[in-house]
Image (cartoon, grey):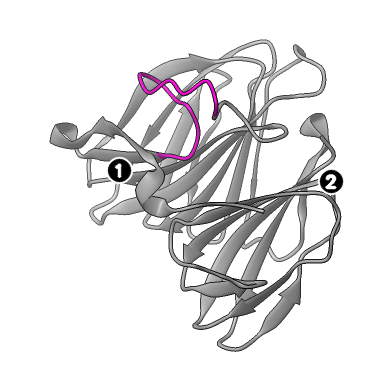
């Protein structure tokens, strides 16, 4: 089990423009050849946008982009004509496929925080697709990447066995928990290789994003 602390995440974004980013993997101008990916996962970015701030139109291709809003509202527009507002508890999934352009902004009047995760597809290309699942309560499969996202909302003292999978990536959104003998807090993550049994126990009210991946 490889524990990565919140303080180890690389800084990005443009704070003067109201964008503060923290990256779990090699990303943008921060290149780390020893931290390019874990399984299909190539990015897990914590983004904080001030009211009115955002990412102008930019392209993506051959990437499955999954977004979880923590607080605030995320406005999405893309080159296929889709537009939506994503709120806390919703999961947004943009399959960039052969190529798509999009805009992501905080058009609200309160701060926005979201986690955005990028996964490499098993087969590149195809037609772009976009979905928003409101108030996710069940595991969210991303078959194009051989992965499934779980959202764990644990009460103080609650225990949860992590699903068995060859690769598991756990990110603490809020709260703190014990993962076997290790304590994790907000922004901390764990990369787990192998199908050994692993139990999480919440010390406080805790929200966790967990990816299970085949490879």
Relative to 98, residue 21 above or below? below
Does 32 appear above or below 54? Answer: above
| Mark 1, secondary structure of its residue | loop
Horizontal side of 176 relative to 182 (left or right) equals: left
Asked whether residue 34 is in view, the answer is yes
Q: Residue furthest left?
A: 16
Q: Position of residue 122 (x, y in %)?
A: 81, 23
Residue drawn at the location 73% of the way across and 76% of the way down:
160
Report the span colored magenta.
23-34
The residue carrying mark 1 is 107
* Residue at the image point whose x is 44% and y is 53% from the top: 5
**Is residue 186 or residue 18 the one in the foreground?**
186
Residue found 46% across the figure and 73% down from its top? 175
Counting from the top left corner in percent of width and height, residue 98 is at 68, 10
Examine the image and state in which quarter residue 30 appears: top left
Q: Is residue 73 visible?
A: no
126 to 140, vertically: above or below: above
Q: Quadrant of residue 9?
A: top left
Q: Residue at x 76, y 62 (%)?
A: 138
Q: Position of residue 31 (x, y in %)?
A: 43, 20
Q: Nearer the viewer, mark 2 or mark 1?
A: 2
For the residue pair 71 and 123, the one nearer the viewer reads as: 123
Check residue 66 in the rendering and tell me which mark sits there, or answer none.
none
**Residue 181: in magenta span:** no
- Of the numbered discs in the image, which one, if any, rests on residue 166? 2
The C terminus lies in quadrant: top right
Element at label 2: loop
In the image, 144 versus 130, the foreground residue is 144
């Amino acid at each position: 089990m490889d524990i990565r602390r919140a303080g180890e995440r690389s800084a990005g974004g443009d704070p003067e423009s109201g964008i503060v980013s923290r990256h779990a993997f090699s990303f943008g101008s921060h290149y780390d050849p020893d931290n390019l990916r874990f399984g299909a996962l190539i990015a897990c970015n914590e983004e904080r946008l001030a009211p009115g701030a955002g990412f102008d139109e930019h392209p993506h291709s051959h990437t499955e982009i999954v977004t979880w809003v923590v607080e605030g509202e995320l406005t999405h527009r893309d080159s296929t004509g889709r537009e939506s507002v994503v709120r806390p508890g919703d999961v947004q999934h943009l399959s960039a496929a052969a190529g798509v352009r999009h805009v992501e902004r905080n058009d609200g009047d309160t701060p926005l925080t979201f986690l955005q995760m990028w996964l490499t597809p098993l087969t590149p290309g195809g037609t772009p697709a976009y979905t928003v699942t409101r108030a996710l309560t069940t595991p969210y499969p991303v078959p194009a990447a051989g992965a499934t996202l779980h959202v764990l909302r644990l009460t103080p003292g609650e225990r949860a066995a992590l699903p068995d999978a060859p690769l598991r990536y756990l990110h603490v959104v809020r709260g703190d928990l014990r993962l076997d003998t290790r304590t994790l807090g907000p922004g901390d993550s764990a990369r787990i290789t192998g199908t050994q049994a692993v139990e999480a126990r919440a010390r406080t009210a805790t929200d966790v994003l967990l990816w299970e991946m085949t490879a």
